[in-house]
Image (cartoon, rainbow, N blue to C red):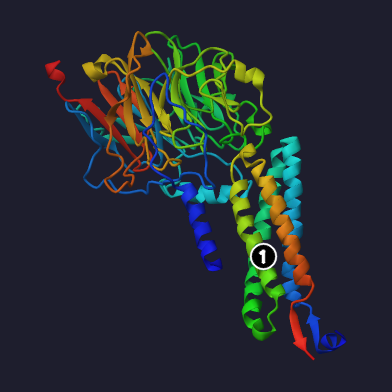
Amino acid sequence: MADFNDRYSRLAIHPLHAVLLAFPLPLFLSALVADMAYRSTYLIQWLNFAQWLIAGALLMGAFVLVWALVELVRSRELRTVWHMIYFLSLLAMWILGFINALEHAKDAYATMPGGMWLSLIVTLLALVATWVGYSGLREEVR
Amino acid sequence: MRNKIIPAFLLALFLSACGGEPPPPSYGANPELPEPERGLLPSMVISMPAEWGDQKPTVPQGYSVEMIADDLSVPRQTLVLPNGDILVAEGSGGSAPVMRPKDMIANYVKKQGKTDRPGGNRLTLLRDADGDGRYELKTTFAENVNAPYGMALIGDSLYVANQDAVVRFEYQDGQTRASGPPEKIVDLPSVYNHHWTKAMAASVDGRYLYVGIGSNSNITERGMEVEEDRAMVWQIDPQTRMHRRYATGLRNPSALAVDPDTNQLWVAVNERDEIGDNLVPDYLTAVRDGGFYGWPYSYWGRNVDERAQPQRPDLVERAITPDYSLGAHVAALGLAFSTPAMGERFAEGVFVGEHGSWNRKVPVGFKVVFVPFRNGRPTGAAPVDFVTGFLNEGGDARGRPVGVSVDPRGALIVADDLANVIWRVTPTDRAAQ
C-alpha cells in the first residue's frame, strides 16, 4: 500500500472547473428550501425563487457536465471508476434538474409536491458529484 | 445498453407532452369534464400567421362577406353608431413583468401567433355614406388612448374602456373626430394587466356601465395579492362615478353584452389553461348580481382546481355553474346579440368571436359562431359556424376574429387582429325575406 501511495497521487480538479462545480449544490439546495417554504406558506415568491435557482444550477451545471465529459474522455489509461461516477452523477443531476425545471414551470400549486421531491433528489445527486469532484480526479504517476 | 437509456428517456419525456388526439370539445349546458391532466410540457400548437391574399372568410349560403377596412393596428372591438358609422378600438396592452424563466419562453412562443404591429392606441371611424356596403371613409376619431377595448354610447356620451380607466368623449351624431381629449370617469385595476382587455356594455336604460376585468394570471401563479379586484365584472354608474363588484370569479370576462329585450347582462369568459385539451370550457353565461363563478378555486361550478392554494371551500360551495359551454380554449373575445335583420336562421341568439387556441393539440376557435337563443336563453343546441376559414388548409392562421358587433340594419362586423382588417357579413337574399 505504501508503494501505491508513492506512485500515485490525486490531483485537485482545475481551479475553473472547481469554481463551476461550486454552483449546482448550493443552488439546488436553495431551490429545495424555497420549495419547502412555498409548500408551507403558499407565497408564490418562493416558487419564483426556486425557478431561477434551478435555472442557474442548470446553466452552471451544463459547463461542469461538459468539463467532466472531456475529462472522462481524456483520462484514458488513467481513468478510474471515480471519473465514471463523477460524470454519471452530474449527468443524472442535470437531466433530473431539467425535468425539475419543467415541473416548476407548471402554474402555482401544480408544482407541488412533485417539484419538491425532484429538488431533493437533484440536491442529493449534486452532493455526490461535488463530493467526488472535490476528492480529486486526475491521477498522476510519480 | 447504457447509451440507449438516455434516448428512451427523452422520447418518454417528449411523448408525455404529445399523446393522441383529444376528443372534440363539448358544448352546451352540460359539457363533459375530463380529469385534469398535464404532461411535463403543456399542449401547445401555435397557428403561424399566413396571408389572406385574395381569399376571404367563409360564410353560410345566402350571406356574403367583404373586407371594409384594412391596414389597421390591432383592431379588437367595434361599435356601430346610430348613424351607421363604425368605431374600431385598436390597441394592445398589458405590462406584466417576467417573474420566472417560463414567462420569457411563453411570451416568445405566443408572440409567434400574433401580428408584429404595435397596437394603435386609437379609435378609427369607418363610414359608408351612400349605403353601398363600401366604407369609403376611414379616419382617426381619437388617438393617444391607452389600449382601448370596450365601447358604449349612452346619449351624447361615448364611453371607452381603456386598459386603465373608463373615459368619456362627447359625441354628436355624424361626428368624425373627437372634439377634445377624453374625460376620465373611473380608474380601472391595471397593475400588471396580465389580462388587459376591459370589455364593456351599457344597460338598456343607459343607467349603468358594466366592465369586465380579467385575472392577473392563469391560475394565481403571480400570487393572490395581484388578484385584488380582478376576475370580476364591475357595475359603474357614470353619473356618480361610483362602482361596485357586480359578479366575481370570472377568470377573464373578455366580452360583455346586454340582451336588448330583457336587459340581462351576458358575458363570455375565457377559462383557465394547462389542465388538459378539453378543460376548462370557455363559457357564455347570464351574469347574476352578486354571483361567484369559481375562479380561481373551482371551475364549471364546484370542480375544485388544486392549483389554487390555499383553497376556499366556503366560496367553492356557492360557485355558480355557467349556462353554456363554448368549448375549451376557443378564446371567446367577442359577443353580440343578433337582430331579425340578420336573417331568419340567425335572428335570435348571440354571435361569438373566437380568437382561437394555443393550449390544445388540435386547434379550436378561429371562427365566429352563432349560439341560438329562445326566450332569452340558449336553446342548448350546438353553436352554428357563421364565419370560418380563418385557418388555412395547412393549419396556419390567415386571421383571428376578436370583437363582433351587429349593425341593426343587418350586418355582422368582425374585427380581425391578425390580418388587421374589419370584415362585414351581410345577408344577400334580403329581398326574398
Residue at the far front in the pictured view:
A1
Q: Which residue is more in the foreground, B240 or A135?
A: A135
* Quadrant assignment, res A126: bottom right
Q: Is residue A141 visible?
A: yes
Q: Identify the chain of the residue marked 1, using the numbered disc in the image.
A: A
Q: Residue at x 66, y 70 (%)?
A: A87
**Label 1: how many residues lie within 10 Å, few (<14), some (14-19) or many (20+)?**
many
Q: Is residue B419 left or right of residue B429?
A: right
The percent coordinates of residue B118 (x first, y second) are 45, 46
Q: Amino acid at mark 1?
A: Leu
The percent coordinates of residue B82 (x first, y second) are 33, 19
Disc count in the image?
1
Check the image and report above or below for A97 versus A34: below
Q: Is residue B176 visible?
A: no
* Quadrant assignment, res B224: top right
Residue at the far bottom in the pictured view:
A142
Q: Residue at x 75, y 43 (%)?
A: A36
Q: Which residue is mark 1?
A: A90
- Secondary structure at badge 1 equals helix
In the picture, which quadrant includes the C terminus of chain B? top left
Q: Is residue B91 left or right of residue A35?
A: left
The percent coordinates of residue A96 (x first, y second) are 62, 56
Residue at the far right in the pictured view:
A2
Q: Residue at x 16, y 20 (%)?
A: B430
Q: Is residue B22 left or right of residue A54?
A: left
* Quadrant assignment, res B183: top right
The percent coordinates of residue B19 (x first, y second) are 43, 45
Q: Which residue is more in the foreground, A75 or A31?
A: A75
